[in-house]
Image: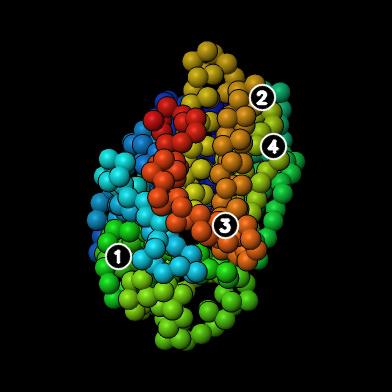
Amino acid sequence: MTDIYDVLIVGGGPVGGCAGTLLTRASLRVCILEPRRPEVPPIGTPLEARVVAISRASERILRSAATWDRVIGSRVEAYERMRIWHESTPPANALVFDAADVGEPNLGYIIENRLLQAALLDEFTAAGGELIAADFRDLSVGADAVTVETSAGILSAKLVIGADGARSAVRESIGLTASVGDFNETAIVATIATQHPHEKTAWQRFMRKGTLAFLPLADGTSSIVWSADNDLAANLVAMSAAEFETELTRASDVALGSTRLVSERMTFPLKRVSAHRYVTQRCALIGDAAHVVHPLAGQGVNLGLLDAATLAQLVLEARSEREDPGALRVLRQYERWRKSEVAFMSTAIDAFDRFLAHGGGPLSRLAQHGLGWVNRSQQIKRLFVNRALGVAGELPHAAR
Ligand SMILES: Cc1cc2nc3c(=O)[nH]c(=O)nc-3n(C[C@H](O)[C@H](O)[C@H](O)COP(=O)(O)OP(=O)(O)OC[C@H]3O[C@@H](n4cnc5c(N)ncnc54)[C@H](O)[C@@H]3O)c2cc1C
């Protein structure tokens, strides 16, 4: 055994990268294990289809992690409104959330996954963090430290954070169980040129066989996330580009005019994951390792960045009181704080999927009509906008 880190993070995705950067900038000795480090996409290269919508709260967390300046630029689009409607109503009757209604310049940003992850890892190493290109294998928890077996050898840390995504090997190693459910849907992701401009608007149509979202990109194209029932998704990816474009234009209700594919179609089978516990002695899970939600509300990374900022805050508070950062008391505080927030969001997202995207019964019809009703109630709209901005719930300092 060579080194004892204060914190060892398994997984340098956006969530692990953010936790690592916040902790390193506060002078903790931190190591991230990440076998696949991406590079910031070179200037002038086409935008990638795999993007995430991040909230204004996430923007503030990235500013706290000194990473915002590495992210913001010509590849990022700020979106100013959302238009949401159900297939039973025309697009003109859409529920509209506008940043201007709450005095904000925008509701959030559409950012390539790769850019976000690479920017965080670049800042992490620039701040003095140690990035090791190795795979996690196993761990054992001792009284004073955790011993971690990796493909690059044995490491040791006072606290291990599992940020290794939905199929977390850390979760398994520490014996934390999770409920895993299948949405029986596959998300199709692609970059699309549209006949009409996207107007810095995120467009989303709920249908009985899934949900279709157009996320506005900085070069005028849009990234679609079409979460369709598995049988429909299989047909859609098997089609020729021209057939797919016809189906897409029809499914979008021609809201943006005709559509043209400008990238390959990528597919993501959709699962729901909910760890029963987020922590054990000296170990904590964050991001998709702890919870995976349906992408229809664009909340996965946003929830994960809040996990990262909350855990970092509590660990740093423990240090300032000379307390062990791996102490179960500290980690339980993190679990209590985040688990209820995530459960609320996850239940709300599942209800949207069940009643708006799939349902046909009276409750569903009520929910579909409810969209028009919400549109007329400024108070309820504000509630939804605050959720989109990420300013609802109890926020860690970095997100305020
Ligand atoms: C189609 C789609 C659209 C989405 N859109 C949005 C959106 O608009 N907004 C939003 O907020 N979220 C969105 N999400 C969710 C979002 O992508 C995830 O929540 C987010 O990527 C989770 O980040 P993470 O860092 O926790 O995990 P990941 O991104 O999965 O990163 C995990 C990292 O761990 C590493 N790793 C894995 N195993 C090991 C190991 N054994 N050893 C070492 N390292 C390991 C991996 O290489 C990876 O880099 C979307 C998801 C999908 C599928």
Circle 2 packing at 10 Å, graded few (<14), some (14-19), many (20+), is some
Residue 192, above or below 101: below
On the picture, is 127 further left or further right than 316? left
Q: Quadrant of the C terminus?
A: top left
On the picture, is 295 further left or further right than 397? right
Type of the residue with mark 1: His
Circle 4 packing at 10 Å, graded few (<14), some (14-19), many (20+), is some
Q: Do the residues labelled 2 and 3 touch (CB within 8 Å)?
A: no
Q: Where is residue 13 in the image (x, y as percent from the top left)?
A: 49, 49
Question: Could you say whether the residue bearing mark 2 is in a helix, strand or loop?
Answer: helix
Give the number of the mark in front: 3 or 1.
3
Kindly identify which residue carries mark 2.
328
Q: Where is residue 260 in the image (x, y as percent from the top left)?
A: 35, 79
State the separation of the CA atoms marked 1 and 2: 48 Å
Give the number of the mark in front: 1 or 2.
1
Kindly identify which residue carries mark 4.
277
Q: In terms of image quadrants, where is residue 176?
A: top right
Q: Which of 314 and 348 is in front in this view?
A: 348
Q: Where is residue 314 in the image (x, y as percent from the top left)?
A: 53, 24
Residue 232, above or below 344: below
Circle 1 packing at 10 Å, graded few (<14), some (14-19), many (20+), is many
Type of the residue with mark 4: Arg
Q: Which residue is located at x 60 percent, y 53 percent?
A: 351
Q: Which of marks 2 and 3 is nearer the N terminus?
A: 2
Question: Could you say whether the residue bearing mark 1 is in a helix, strand or loop?
Answer: loop
Instruction: Indicate if the residue with disc 3 has its beta carbon within 8 Å of ligand 1.
Output: no
Kindly identify which residue carries mark 1.
198
Give the number of the mark in front: 2 or 4.
4
State the separation of the CA atoms marked 3 and 4: 35 Å
Q: Earlier in the sequence, mark 2 or mark 4?
A: 4
Using the rendered image of the protein, determine whether residue 294 is visible from the camera's viewpoint.
no
